[in-house]
Image (tube, rainbow, N blue to C red):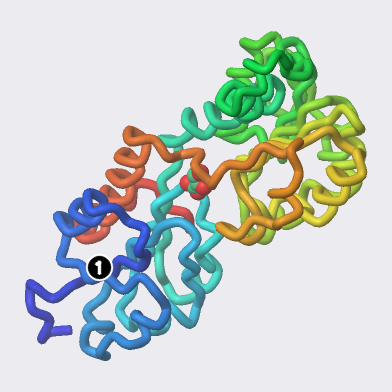
Amino acid sequence: MSDLRLSDPVTLISSDSFTPDEIARIEVVAPALRAGTKEARAALPADQRASIKAIANKGHRAIDGAQMDLFPNLKLIAQFGVGYDAIDVAAATARGIKVTNTPDVLNEDVADLAVAMMLGWARQIPQGDAWVRNGTWASGRELPLNRKMSGAKVGIAGMGRIGRAIADRLAAFNMEVHYCSRGEKDTPGWTYHTDVVALAAAVDWLVVAVVGGDSTRGYVSRAAIEALGPQGVVINIARGTCIDEEALIEALQQGKIAGAGLDVFYNEPHVDARLIAMDNVLLQPHQASSTVETRRDMSMAQCANLAAFFAGEALITPVN
Ligand SMILES: O=C(O)C(=O)CO
């Protein structure tokens, strides 16, 4: 790379979903070029591909081994997001490529949205809003009774940093907290279960907060969903792949569970039409971390990793 000019782009921005502010931050670290699709990346001239040392990735833009091989001098993939299931980390490791993510800064927002979806589902907030706006209330009809959330039993599947932030909030609602996790945690008296089926059987609310990726594909199984029972509600702020979505849809259609609040789906942003058709399902467009404050912090965390890499310093939040 001795013929590399200082102005040659060394970072590839691999998603069209970065905002102008986020792109500007990446460009402050080092010269960058944008190629938001596989086609655009494949069409880059070989000398431009050879100058790329880091990829700034966001969301679900899948980076597999073949994508990595387009860039012979690639040494870092800096993911915007705590989840890095879009990146084939094993393929990266095999090629000597480091992967980083942006953990922690989004815990509170993701936990807030989990609680908001629980309250929104229980207290029928979307339905109540429509009731007022479309004149049903003015016509004299009362909204059907809500479900009480405070004091109920909740199971958190995955007691990592986000699961913990959710549990802390729900404890303040006087909920009886149960959880399952890779191991028992130091908690204020919450009940540990070794598997998700036993967890679901013990509670009415099941909140999914496990990591995404192959290790948790279908983790909330048909058996777990059915164990929740006809009063049960599933909340998912993790990844669509963490739940057997087909089993979830069938359980909802057949009244085997009462409802669901979903921020994530198998095939985002194309949500299964059967979920859209059910009014006992509260749907969100994968927006758990989407606040101005947190997205700024995630962008800064991504750029801190890029900056450390280009300065030859230790990465801040390495994954591999
Ligand atoms: O950061 C992530 O991976 C998210 O999905 C936030 O919702």
- Vertical placement of 121 versus 234: above or below? above
Q: Nearer the viewer, residue 5 or 132?
A: 132
Residue positioned 67% across, 61% down in the render: 214
Residue 229 as seen in the image, left or right of residue 186: right
Residue 44: % across, % down:
28, 85
Name the amino acid, label 1: Thr
Residue 274 as seen in the image, left or right of residue 288: right
Residue 132 as seen in the image, left or right of residue 197: left
Disc 1 residue crowd, few under 14, some 14–19, many 20+, Cα 10 Å: many
Residue 175: % across, % down:
72, 14
Residue 185: % across, % down:
68, 27
How many marks the image carries: the answer is 1
Please identify the quarter of the rendering in which residue 58 is found: bottom left
Residue positioned 62% across, 52% down in the render: 212
Q: Nearer the viewer, residue 304 or 15?
A: 15
Furthest-front residue in this view: 139
* Tag 1 residue: 11
Residue positioned 78% across, 19% down in the render: 144
Q: Secondary structure at mark 1?
A: strand
From this viewpoint, is residue 164 visible?
no
